[in-house]
Amino acid sequence: MPIPLVANPVYSYPFPAQHRFPMEKFGLLQDYVANQGWLSGNPFYRPGKASLALLELAHCPAYLQRFINNQQSPAELKAMGLPWSEALVRRTLISPNGTLLTALLALEKGIACHLAGGTHHAHRDFASGFCILNDLAVTALALIKQQKVQHVLIFDCDVHQGDGTARILENNPHIFTCSIHCQDNFPSTKARSNLDVALPRGTQTAQYLSTLKTTLERAIRLSRPDIILYDAGVDIYTADPLGHFAVTEAGIFARDLYVISSCRRQGIPVASVIGGGYDDNRSALAARHGLVIKAAVEVYTQHNH
């Protein structure tokens, strides 16, 4: 039984090659996963466009219209950090639905992976740091509204704090936000998650992993989740240009393996998203994003044998 993998070919589209955001990584990751044989002959689950009603669970309707119709102010576009295009709108309206589909598949199968998502800097009414719509907030709110679950834990291991997620979901008793991030990194003004763990620049693998373990245990104990949305950002990698941590690739794999096997052991469904990663070597980056899927495949296969 292969694990459900969620992706859409429009996630990557022709994009300025010199831009800091590696838009081609999504397509490269889809190719990488197919080449690893992890699909076992099954196609990717392919999400379609999200309804405005779904997106409005987390976002202001006027903001959605400004983005869709290219009516953001110059200041808003600058904060978004991505050049507006029809192709950007197309992918952006699908990705949150991809994370929701991944969560629904995880509830059914125990585990599922989205080959995109983790756009945790998107706020209720503005884009920030390459994040336009907050797929984690949209998904958590939809799961609660549709009464699929009572408690959601968003476990965010991207190197940057999930400030948008924390702000959109603050005061929601059903959703617990947890962020392990680099203290001196974007965003300069941090939000308040339910549980924040800020680590110093230069944090190495051993320290990172020991913090991860205690934090995950604490977050699970405090939130008692029916599902975990796991943001497996790989910008914690030692050579990531936007990261400032010193975690090895083996360390990233150990992290993913630990999170997924903890969920499996405790019978908590887990849905992963890829989060940030900004390496100029785009195929190495795609393989790094593939580590969470590798970990999921490993845990799932062991469990079923």
Image: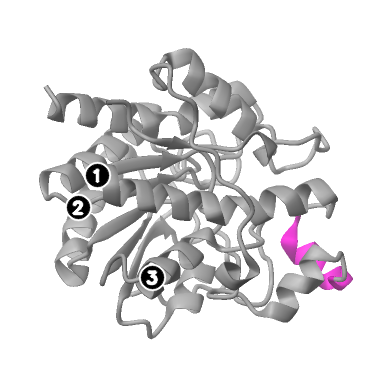
Magenta stretch, residue numbers: 72-81
In this view, the residue farthest toward the bottom is 171
Q: Is residue 219 above or below residue 61?
A: above
Instruction: Check disc 2 and report its element: helix, strand or loop.
Output: loop
Query: For residue 130, what is the image quadrant?
Result: bottom right
User: Where does label 3 land, which residue?
Assistant: 146
Q: Is residue 39 above or below residue 20?
A: above
Residue under the point 66% across and 64% down: 128
How many C-alpha atoms fall within 10 Å of the one at disc 3: few (<14), some, or many (≥20)?
Answer: few
Q: Is residue 140 visible?
A: yes
Total of numbered circles in the picture? 3
Distance of mark 3 from mark 2, alpha carbons? Answer: 19 Å
Residue under the point 76% across and 49% down: 88
Q: Which mark is residue 268?
A: 2
Q: Main secondary structure of the magenta part?
A: helix
Q: Amino acid at mark 3?
A: Gln
User: Where does label 1 land, which residue?
Assistant: 110
Residue under the point 55% across and 28% down: 29
